[in-house]
Image (tube, rainbow, N blue to C red):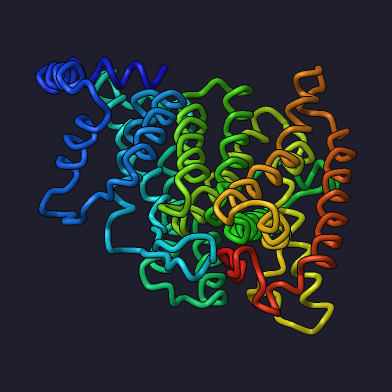
Amino acid sequence: MLSSSLWLLLQRFFPSLIDRADYLIKFNRTTDEAFELVSKSMNGSFLKLPVKRSWRTHFWWLLGGSLVIGGVVGLCCFVLSHLLSRLNLGVDHAKKHGISHEDGSRLGGVAIALTFLLVVIFEALWSGTGSAFDDYGDLVAFLSVTLPIAFIGFVDDISQRLSSSVRLVFMALFAIIGFISFPQLMPTGILQEFFGSENRVGLLVFSVFFFVGFINAGNMVDGANGLLSILVASFFGFCFYLTKTNAHYLMMLVVSVFAFINLFGGTKIMLGDFGAFGLSALTILTAFSVYQIYNVSIFLYASLLCYPCIEIVRIFTARLWIGESPLTADNQHGHNLLFAGLSRLFSPKVANSLTGVVIALISVVPAWVLLALGWSYQTDLFLVVFLFQSLIYIAGTALLKRFFGGLYKSGEGSQGMRPRLQEP
């Protein structure tokens, strides 16, 4: 396990640190005393932000959950998320969502990236022969395509001024350059399978279209509700189930921890555009790679990642039908409408988390259940599953829009607040 390997590495290179940690745990018998020690260590000259006493129990629940899910890797992700959430950088204002009275952070994707980077470095040091993630394929190629895309999101997280058209143009440009530079990342054979012929230009157009399209779809559903994180964690869980590679396991682990923090930590920190762009890009590139090696049915992919795929098609079609730009932002997405309905029954924070869980479960549960029952990951029968999921989403969104769509126009909402969620 990666988490146990990282813990052994810490014991080997930092024995005094481990001994000190053991001593402190024994010495500080109460949660309050232990919290005072941790909060003091985190309130150095760099942060200069006090920790509220009311957050003590919440802090320890999140810390404990992160440890249970991810071990030392989970601890690393939690600490980085906690530290980054307190920086005066990439601030996401509370009024943007209507589910919290506190400002949050858009640097969750940075916490995931740093955790992944630290584990890769530690694994390389531990093995002594190189990265333990060589079985992931050409990691340099993956990062060379993913990081420029993620950088667009990081710039938007910091400035929050990039228009949708500017992001789309640069995204397409980086995608074209990336696939031309690393043609092995394109899903060779997919056009032959579906259209009977294939050429380089056609494959490039196909790859760029689906790559850019899914990144925008992933960004569209990202918010403070953990939805995208759950979908990505499930996807990499499937990849690990199939390939048994360390990198797939690590991505599943880290993103699962972050999804937990996102769901139960309120709006303290969310993926942000860096996280949404980067994870979505890495997801589609991994899908291309695994398809080439294992010939996975693209309809299984569609089922596991159903909601963002359906929602981007639905919302673009609806906007074009009424003569609006498909890049126009609004609050009429399925997750916005479900939140509006759930906020009538629960507090805004609880309704927000339930929104992400409910929609994500509809996407991930059917495929996992059928795989467990013996369905082949190569069968195109998953098309039936995808169509059924699509029907649920489209019909459900239509009903929600009929009953709750007006809330965003009238300004009504749970507890007198206007329900607003993150938009692309």
What's the residue at 86%, 40% (across, down)?
A: 383
Tell me the quarter of the image containing the C terminus. Answer: bottom right
What's the residue at 52%, 32% (across, down)?
A: 252
Tell me the quarter of the image containing the N terminus. Answer: top left
Q: Position of residue 265 (x, y in %)?
A: 45, 45
Q: Tell me if residue 367 comes above or below residue 28 in the rendering.
A: below
Q: Tell me if residue 73 comes above or below residue 44 in the rendering.
A: above
Q: Tell me if residue 122 comes above or below residue 312 in the rendering.
A: above
What's the residue at 60%, 70% (across, down)?
A: 416
From the viewer's perspective, is 385 left or right of 351? right
From the viewer's perspective, is 3 left or right of 124? right
From the viewer's perspective, is 219 left or right of 267? right
The residue sitting at the bottom extreme is 323
Q: Tell me if residue 217 comes above or below residue 246 in the rendering.
A: below
Q: Position of residue 144 (x, y in %)?
A: 42, 50
What's the residue at 39%, 26% (across, down)?
A: 67
- Nearest the eye: 93 or 278: 93
Q: Is residue 125 visible?
A: yes
- Nearest the eye: 3 or 60: 60
Q: Is residue 204 visible?
A: no
- Nearest the eye: 325 or 129: 325
Q: Position of residue 119 (x, y in %)?
A: 33, 31
- Number of marks present in the image shown: 0
Q: Position of residue 161 (x, y in %)?
A: 44, 77
- Nearest the eye: 364 or 35: 35
